[in-house]
Amino acid sequence: MSEPDTLRQRLTEPSLIAAVVTWLAVLAMTVIEPGRQVGAWDPETTRTMAVAAAVGFMLLMASQTAAGKLWPARTHLLLVLAQAALALLVAAMSRSGSGPILLIIVMSELVTRTQARTLWWIFGVVNLGLFLIHWQNWGLSSAVIAGFSYAGFQLFAIIITRYASRSESTSMALREVNAHLLATRSLLAESARDQERLRIARELHDVAGHKLTALKLQLRSLARRPELAHDEAVQMSGQLADELLNDMRAVVQQMREQDGMDLRAAIEELVAPFPRPRAIIEIAEDARVDTVAKADAIVRAVQEALTNAARHGDAQTLWITLKRIDDRIEVDIRDDGRAVSAGKAGNGLQGMHERFREVGGDVSVRHDLARGFQIHAWVPMT
C-alpha cells in the first residue's frame, strides 16, 4: 500500500475521530461565547485570540497525525506541550469554560510516546496552570472544584489510553509468539519431510535398485538359453526391467535434487497472523537449506523485519525474496515504512547477527527514511 493508504488508516482511527469531534465542540463554544476582559484587551479581542489558539491546537494535532511516527519522541513532546499551552490560552481567554477539555486530548497524546515520569511532571504543571487561571477568574473554591474535576477527567484519559496501549502491545506480542510457534512447527515438519525424502531415496537406490539390477541379470541369463532365446515374454520382461530401473534412478535423482528444506510454508505461517504489513513472498524453487539452524536464521530475520514493520516502521507492505546465487542462499527483506534510526543494536538485531554467523553466513541491516527498513543476508548451501 502507498503512503495515502497509511494516512487514511490513521485518519479513521476512533480515538482521532473522537478528538476531532471534541475539538469541534470546543471551537463552537469558543466562537459563540464572548471572551474575557484581560487587562487592556476587550472581550472581542480575547475571543479572537481564543479561537486562534483553538485553531492552532488543531493544526498541531493534524501535523502529528500526518507525520505518524516520522518525528522523534522529543519533537512529539514539544508539539504536545505547545498544544497544552494553546489549550490553557483558550481557558484563560474564553468565558465558555471549554478550554480545559482540550487538555484531555493532550494527556491522551502524551501517554503513548512519553516516559511516565515526564508525563506526571507535565500533568502537574499543566493542572497547576489551569488552577491558577480558574482561581483568578472564579475564586479559590471554584478553582479547587474545577481543578479536581478536570484533573480527574485527564487521569481517566491517561489510564484508559495507557491500558489500551498495553493491550495493543500485549496483543502484538502474542501474535509474534504465535507466529513464531507456527513457523517453528512448519520448519520441524519440513525437516521431517526432508529426512523422509532422503530415507526413501536411499532405500530406492540401495535396496530396490540392487534387486532390480539382480532381476535384469537373471533375465539376461534366461535369454541366453537356446530354448528361451526368442521367447517374447522373456524379452519383454527384460525390457520392462530396464525401463523400471531407469525410471527409479530418475525418481531418486529428482528426490535428491529436491534435497533441503523449503521455507515457503514456514514464512507464510509467520506472516499470516499479522493484518499489517501485507507480505509479498518470492522464493525460488532451488532456494533450499540443508539444516534447521540455517532455516531458523532466515525465519528469524523475516520475523525481525516483520516486527519492525508492524511496530515501528508504520509499513504497509513487506517484500521477502529468497534466491540461490552460486553456492549460497541470498535473503532480501524490505518494507515501505519509515525506518527509525538504527542506534545501538537491540537484542533482536544482535541475535539475528549471531545466528547467521553461527551457520557460516552474514547479515546486514539498513535503515533508510526514504526506502524503509532493509535486511540483506546469506547462508551457504552446505
Image (cartoon, rainbow, N blue to C red):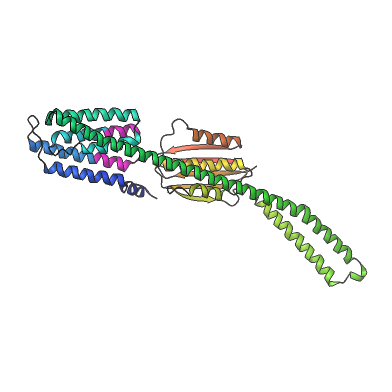
Q: Residue at x 17, y 35 (%)?
A: 91
> Residue 151, image x and y in percent?
24, 33
Residue 35, x across and y down, in percent: 10, 37
In front here: 71 or 369?
71
Q: Quadrant of residue 246?
A: bottom right
Q: Main secondary structure of the magenta part?
A: helix
Q: Does the magenta portion include 17?
A: no
Q: Is residue 364 above or below residue 9?
A: above
Query: In this picture, which residue range is highlighted in magenta?
Result: 59-80
Count of numbered circles in the view: 0
**Coordinates of residue 142 in the picture (x, y in percent):** 15, 31
Q: Confirm whether the magenta stretch covers residue 77.
A: yes
Q: Is residue 76 left or right of residue 208?
A: left
Q: Is residue 31 left or right of residue 319?
A: left
Q: Is residue 81 visible?
A: yes
- Residue 228, by quadrant, is bottom right
Q: Which residue is pictured at 19% across the width and 41% down the height?
A: 55
Side of 93 where 260 appears, left or right: right
Q: Residue at x 32, y 28 (%)?
A: 118
Q: Which image quarter holds the C terminus?
A: top right
- Image x and y of residue 322, in percent: 55, 47
Vertical relation: 198 (above or below) 372 = below
- Regarding residue 338, the answer to whether it shows in the image is no
User: Left or right: 241 with respect to 160?
Assistant: right
